[in-house]
Amino acid sequence: MKTRRRQFVERLTSEISYLEFNLNPTKKSEEEERDWSGLIDSMLFSILGRLETLEDFFSFRGVCRNWRSISSPCPETLASQSPLILLTRFPSYTEAFFDISRRRLYNFQLPWRLYSRFSLAFSHGFLVTSTEPPRSRILLWNLFSGDHIRLPRSPEPFRRVILSSPPSSPQCLMVLFHPGNSTIQFSWLGDSLWKVHSWGPAHLIHDMIFFQGRLFALINGRLALVDLAPCPQFTLLEDSLDVEWKRNSQRFLAKSGEELLLVCCFEFSIFRWAFGGGGWVELKSLDGRALFIGLGGFAASVVPPCLGVRENCVYFAGRNADGWCEFSLKDRCLETVSVASPGLLRSQTSLPPIWVLPSLS
């Protein structure tokens, strides 16, 4: 039986022949043996741009040392990868990736069991994973390279994690919080301890996000600018939304291009913050973009064309454990997508699905 790698190489032969003809019309005859490692970089990058599954991407990296050296995981080499959603499997009690465009579950599994560790978020190519509280052990695990970063134990419970920048940056700041609580924990990568601060029960945090180098929060339903140094404090900005709207909504801070957004995932209303003093302004369009949001918070904003992604659409994972919702701002239509794949835990787990966007890693 042919190996998957061999099958992948044969599948690329026709593509390479086409590219060779266009880049070099005087190419050698088909009978001559190919030197796969000698293909020019422009041709290899063209091939990378056509790989739309992680299986093909990793098979490409496994062909030879030269191919691996030019295909390090980054937004350029992963630009054509479609969005994935991380779901829970049974009876292995592991997490597995589902390709939302091809409607298929990958066999690739993460190297831990749910009773020992689980995923909370995906950011800058890293899965943020944690053990159960108290004193949760946090691990950043790179989906593509296998690199991992261990962080100090968390002294307080939390459910959401946000990063200010890629973990490779010395200025990477991590913030932990629990929606509906008033306590935040924060640490710069490399610190040995978390700093913990509470604003008291009168100031409840609903969501937080880093936007243009600053930390914003929803506190009691109002937008606030947070300053962590030297002592954590926040400044409430002037506007707030209707009380009835706040009571009946799952609301998340998001960002799209140069705009700070507020997304209500109950009736799918979207607002942008007018920094000139206009407060929240409702949007009827995302200017062709698509938003990905889950119970773990904002995941990504992408610009189609991207395989399987629609323009002006909100993708929300959280209402059920084995699927997601797609809401089109164009026709105000809501579609619920359930993963029809055997072996999922479905309602047997309280862990929410997590969006994984390889093209933004």
Image (tube, helix red, strand yellow):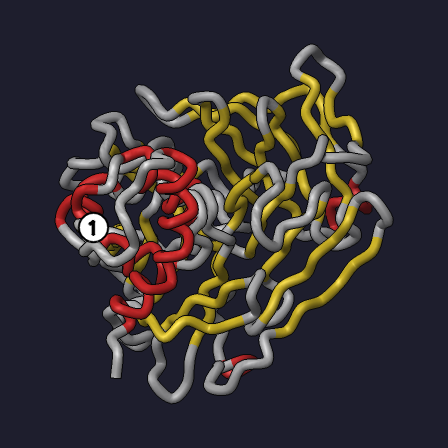
Quarter of the image with the C terminus in it: top left
Residue 183 visible in the current orientation? no
Front one among 181 and 299: 299
Q: On the picture, is 308 further left or further right than 333? A: left
The image position of residue 50, as x and y in percent, is 45, 48
Count of numbered circles in the view:
1
Residue 193 placement: quadrant: top left
**Three-letter code, disc 1:** Trp
Q: Residue at x 58, y 22 (%)?
A: 258
The residue pinned by badge 1 equals 36
The image position of residue 167, as x and y in percent, is 26, 37
Q: On the picture, is 84 further left or further right than 317? A: left
Label 1 residue SS: helix
Dot 1 crowding, Cα within 10 Å, few <14, some 14–19, many 20+:
few
Q: Residue at x 56, y 69 (%)?
A: 103
Q: On the picture, is 74 further left or further right than 31? A: right
In the image, residue 86 sits, relative to residue 35, either above or below, namely below
Residue 347 visible in the current orientation? yes
Front one among 286 and 73: 73
Residue 130 placement: quadrant: bottom left
In the image, residue 303 sits, relative to residue 126, either above or below, namely above
Quarter of the image with the N terminus in it: bottom left
Q: Residue at x 22, y 36 (%)?
A: 189
In the image, residue 270 sits, relative to residue 259, either above or below, namely below
The image position of residue 203, as x and y in percent, is 55, 38
Residue 224 placement: quadrant: top right
Front one among 349 and 42: 42
Q: On the picture, is 104 further left or further right than 130? A: right
In the image, residue 141 sits, relative to residue 6, either above or below, namely above
Q: Residue at x 52, y 29 (%)?
A: 216
The image position of residue 106, as x and y in percent, is 41, 71
